[in-house]
Amino acid sequence: MKRFDNINVIPLIDVILVLLAIVLMTASFIVKDSLNIDLPETQSTQSYVPEQDITPVYFHIDHNNQLYIDEAPQTQAFSLQFIKQLTPEQHIVIQVDKKAEFGYFVQLIDALKQQQLDKLTILTKARES
């Protein structure tokens, strides 16, 4: 009978790498826009890549004019209190459905500007040629 002095772990590593690739690919689809916000189209859209060391705060306004902060529905009073707690260094990402009333977007921008929050990114999607 042949004695085994070592274990070949290369096939195990291959299987783990394949499983890791599958998990990473499906995780990006799960996180992507669970609010179903239909963004307006623009021709000068650039990709948004958040800085790794800074976690942005996401504000969303859906087609029913409901405000969400980090995908949690919020009242106007809570959102104003939340905005007052943010620091000027905080990065903010805004997504507004194209069917939302423009006044709600203006109110959000006004509340952010009153607190000197200028690091804003407004997300849109690229217009198809």
Image (cartoon, rainbow, N blue to C red):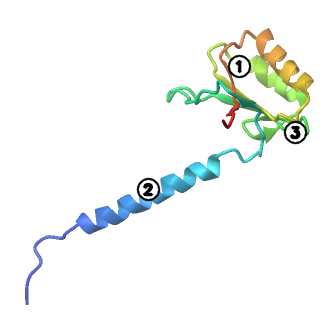
Residue at point 69% right, 29% down?
123
The residue singled out by tag 2 in the image is 21
Above or below for 77 versus 27: above
For label 2, the SS is helix
Neighbour class for label 1 at 10 Å: few (<14), some, many (≥20)? some
State the quadrant of the N terminus: bottom left
Please state if 10 lies on the left or on the right of 64 as rendered.
Answer: left
**Measured Cα–Cα span from mark 1 to mark 2:** 36 Å
Q: Nearer the viewer, residue 118 or 46?
A: 46
* Mark found first going from the N terminus, 1 or 2: 2
Residue at point 80% right, 18% down?
109
For label 1, the SS is loop
Q: Nearer the viewer, residue 128 or 10?
A: 128
Please state if 96 lies on the left or on the right of 117 as rendered.
Answer: right
Where residue 18 sits in the image (x, y, percent)?
A: 39, 61
* Mark found first going from the N terminus, 3 or 2: 2
User: Where, by quadrant of the figure, is residue 72 drawn?
Assistant: top right
The residue singled out by tag 1 in the image is 86
Give the label on residue 63, or none.
3
**Measured Cα–Cα span from mark 3 to mark 2:** 35 Å
For label 3, the SS is loop
Residue type highlighted by circle 1: Leu
Q: Nearer the viewer, residue 34 or 114?
A: 34
Residue at point 55% right, 26% down?
54
Where residue 99 sits in the image (x, y, percent)?
A: 88, 36
Residue type highlighted by circle 2: Ala
